[in-house]
Each structure stands twice: as structure tokens, then as C-alpha cells.
Image: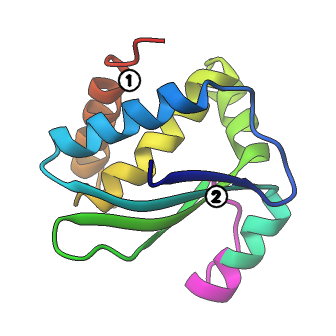
Amino acid sequence: MPIKFFVQDKNPPKFLRKQVKLWISSCVHERGYVLGEINYIFCSDEYLLEINKEYLQHNYFTDIITFNYNEDKTINSDIYISVDRVKENAKTFNQTIVNEFYRVLIHGILHLTGQNDKTKKEEIQMRKFEDLCLSKIKF
């Protein structure tokens, strides 16, 4: 499967990799896209902050940075996820760490399929699509 997981400097919560890959693949296809190669890189706040500064000129923590290498409708990406931020957001939003982790995993995919979250209206739409994808988890 063209979805790979890498640990840079922070381990993610335990998850069923094969089932997560199938779930992500299903969500990609439902959005009308083809799965190319997706690399998830799990890291610390500090590591992702440096990427945020270097590539996006943003000086703040974030939970995810998605680099879009799509070719037409084929999804290709390096997706960096701050495990520290996922844990913090889980507390903030009163979620389990695993639920928040899955939300962030699919959030990057939704960006790759054209969903934005810059405006309040787009953010509401993003949450709707996240919830829809999360409702399809069968593991």
C-alpha cells in the first residue's frame, strides 16, 4: 500500500496500521481521487515548528503540515504531524488521543482533495467531512 508511516522524533499513539491504511484509502476514493504515495511523518512540536518556519514562514506550533505533490487526481504527499500538538488538542477538545490522532490523519487527506479551512464556512465544511470519514472507521 502506498501509505507509509515514519517516526522522526516522537512516537504516535498505538494504532492499527493496516486498518488505518485501508480507511484512508477508502476516504480518498470516496472523494474522487486516486491514492498515489502518502508519507506520514510523526514528530515533536519543535521539529514541526522548524518546518513551519522554514517552508511556510510561520512562527507558531501547528498539529499538521501537508505538502501537496498531487498529480491531477492522484494524491501524493508528505504529511508531518506533531504528536505533542495532537495530545494537547485532545485535552483541549475533550477527545481521546486516538480520536484526535485519526482526525488529524484524515484532515491532511481532505486538504489534498481540495478541502480548505481558512474561513469559518470552510472550517465548518472541513469538520463535516472529517466527521463523515471518522464515522467510517470500522476497527
- Indicate the position of residue 41 as horizontal and vertical percent values: 67, 58
**What is the quadrant of residue 7 in the picture?**
bottom right
Q: Secondary structure at mark 1?
A: helix
Whether pointer 2 and pointer 1 mark residues with C-beta atoms closer than 8 Å, the reply is: no
Q: Position of residue 80 (x, y in %)?
A: 62, 61
Q: Residue at left 69%, top 82%?
A: 53
Camera-side residue of 30 and 125: 30
Q: Which mark is residue 36?
A: none
Residue 128 on the magenta segment: no
The magenta segment: 52-63
Q: Residue furthest front?
A: 1
Q: Nearer the viewer, residue 13 or 62?
A: 13
Residue 56 falls within the magenta-colored stretch: yes
Horizontal placement of 91 versus 33: left or right? right
Q: Residues within 10 Å of mark 1 (few under 14, many from 20)?
A: some
Q: CA distance from mark 2 to mark 1?
A: 21 Å
Residue 117, visible in the rendered structure = no
Residue 93 can be seen in this image: yes
| Disc 2 element | loop
Name the residue nearer the viewer: 126 or 69.
69
Q: Which residue is painted at 17% across and 45% down in the image?
A: 31
Which dot, 2 or 1, sits closer to the camera? 1
Specify the amino acid type for callout 2. Answer: Thr
* Residue at figure coordinates x 24%, y 65% from the top left: 74
Residue that numbered label 2 is attached to: 62
Q: Is residue 56 above or below residue 7?
A: below
Return the residue nearer the eye: 74 or 43. Answer: 74
Please name the amino acid that badge 1 sits on.
Answer: Leu
Which residue lies under the disc numbered 1? Answer: 134
Where residue 70 appears, as percent x and y from the top left, is: 30, 73
